[in-house]
Amino acid sequence: MIVCGCKVHFWAAAVIGVMHVSIALLYVSLVNLLGWGPDEAKLPFMQMGAVYLAIITPWSLWAWRCRPAMYQPWQCQACGYALFGLRQNRCPECGRPFDPALVTQVNVANVVVNEA
């Protein structure tokens, strides 16, 4: 999650990955440093787990809602086919319908220069 989040510049996913690793390291450190056995660790771990869930759940929901689009507006959202210059409002590759207004708003010259 950390590496994938960084690769696509989706930092919320990277932060969630860091939080997962951090809580696991915290649990292992506490058990080793304090010498906790299963009975001693049960209540503190349940409390820390509840706090962790209270923090991570809203963050995860926000990240899920704000995830980056996989394709640009001028690409088919199902297969990535470039939708420029089509006569029908349907992708010729996979058949998914699209909104031609989104495609016509894009400057084709700018796309070609930036994608190369």
Image (cartoon, rainbow, N blue to C red):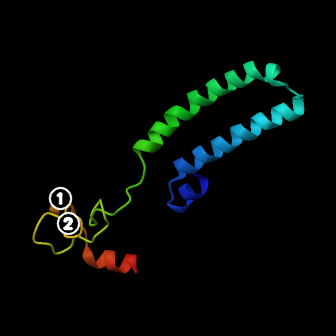
- The CA distance from mark 1 to mark 2 is 6 Å
Q: Position of residue 13 (x, y in %)?
A: 53, 49
State left or right for residue 39 relative to residue 98: right
Mark 2 nearby-residue class (10 Å; few <14, some 14–19, many ≥20): many
Name the residue tied to disc 2: 91
Could you say where residue 65 lies in the image, as x and y percent from the top left? 40, 42
Q: Residues within 10 Å of mark 1 (few under 14, many from 20)?
A: some
The three-letter code of the residue at mark 2 reads: Cys
Label 1 or label 2, whichever comes before in sequence order? 2
Q: Residue at the spot x=54%, y=55% of the render? A: 5
Residue ID at (31%, 76%): 110
Residue 111 picture quarter:
bottom left
- Which residue is the site of mark 1? 97
Q: Is residue 87 left or right of residue 80?
A: left
- Whole-percent x, y for residue 113 in the image: 36, 80
The residue that appears at 16% across and 75% down in the rendered structure is 85
Q: Nearer the viewer, residue 41 or 13?
A: 41
* Image position of 116 with respect to 80: above or below: below
**Quadrant of residue 40 within the rendered picture:** top right
